Image (cartoon, rainbow, N blue to C red):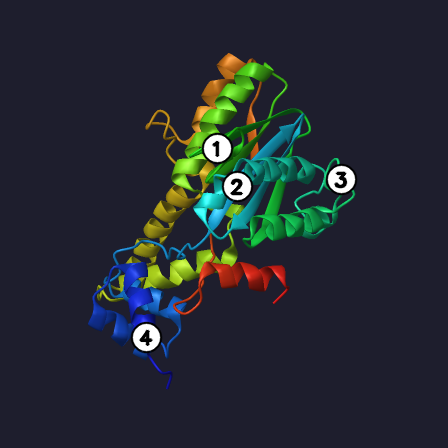
Amino acid sequence: MANITASMVKELRETTGAGMMDCKGALTETNGDMEAAVDYLRAKGLAKAAKKASRVAAEGLVGIATEGKIGAAVEVNSETDFVARNEQFQQTVSTIANVALSCEGDVEKLIAAGYPNSSKSVAEYVSEMVGSIGENMNVRRTAAISVTNGVIASYMHNQVAAGLGKIGVLVGIETEGDEAAALAFGKQVAMHVAAANPLALTPEQLDQDVVERERAVYSEQARESGKPENIVEKMVDGRMRKFYEESVLLSQTFVIDGENTVEKAAKLAEGDIGAPVKITGFIRMQLGEGIDTGPDEDFASEVAKTASGG
């Protein structure tokens, strides 16, 4: 049997909002498996959070850049927010975002690329900054998006300088219509993505492991009602429809008008744009997303470990 520590109970409680004894019981039932314990509490109706949210422990900046029909986003971490406010650091992140435009979302390719107006690679340049500023930094990830005909729209939430902030969004809009109108609509969609945090563009693009996990939780919840299996299936199907409506971009209610789905809003936008409109993809990059240093390790150690390949 796994050793259930106080820190494990605390983490589960922070993630789900469930009571301390419920969290301890869930961890005991699942032999210390944190993810299974979240599902256990959800199935029992004890978890207040609809989805597991990773604890975020990171500073730095997200940078976005666009050029023609290509857009790129990068996350560069630092130990403290003080460094993130440093003008030199901001300029570096902005430069790295522009370098990322030619790296096709490949972080290894990005850090190996030449840093503009220097003889160093991006990785070497950042390493040199670590020495001069005296704080660990790390180019953590990058992502890219492109369109064949149309525009790449962008939005930066909590912007501290042009294209730099905490949540960066890029949206691909395929259209042969008016570019300015397409960019205006695309920015609205990007703002929606920042706020609504969709998991995928369409149901088919959802991670099937996530889908099956949701179905399993809903099935367990429905069976606890004691209803016949055919009714249980209908209940599960209904809850899965709601899950898709909440998780899939095209099915979400557009936050700009609060009435139409994003897919319907794109159709309505065709009047202003003057041609068919198709949202082809999006990138949403949030600072520190998914980083969990654990109870005994600070973020400086996390960055140092990543930078050294540990």
Answer with left or right where residue 165 lies relative to residue 131.
Answer: left
> Mark 1, mark 4: which one is toward the viewer?
1
> Please, is residue 9 above or below residue 283 in the view?
below
- First-in-chain label (1 vs 2): 2
Q: CA distance from mark 4 to mark 3?
A: 52 Å
Query: In which quadrant of the rendered image does the N terminus lie?
Result: bottom left
Callout 1–callout 2 Cβ contact below 8 Å? yes
Q: CA distance from mark 1 to mark 2?
A: 9 Å
- First-in-chain label (4 vs 3): 4
Q: CA distance from mark 3 to mark 1?
A: 28 Å
Element type at marker 1?
strand
**Which residue occupies 38% across, 43% down?**
246
Element type at marker 3?
loop
Callout 2–callout 4 Cβ contact below 8 Å? no
- First-in-chain label (2 vs 4): 4
Q: Which residue is mark 3?
A: 118
Amino acid bearing label 1: Met
- First-in-chain label (3 vs 1): 3
Q: Which residue is mark 1?
A: 156
> Mark 2, mark 4: which one is toward the viewer?
2
Q: Position of residue 153 (x, y in %)?
A: 55, 27
Amino acid bearing label 3: Ser
Q: Which residue is mark 2?
A: 62
Question: Few, some or many C-alpha atoms within 10 Å of disc 4 (few <14, some 14-19, many ≥20)?
Answer: many
Q: CA distance from mark 2 to mark 3?
A: 23 Å
Q: CA distance from mark 2 to mark 4?
A: 35 Å
- First-in-chain label (2 vs 3): 2
Determine if residue 115 is in view: yes
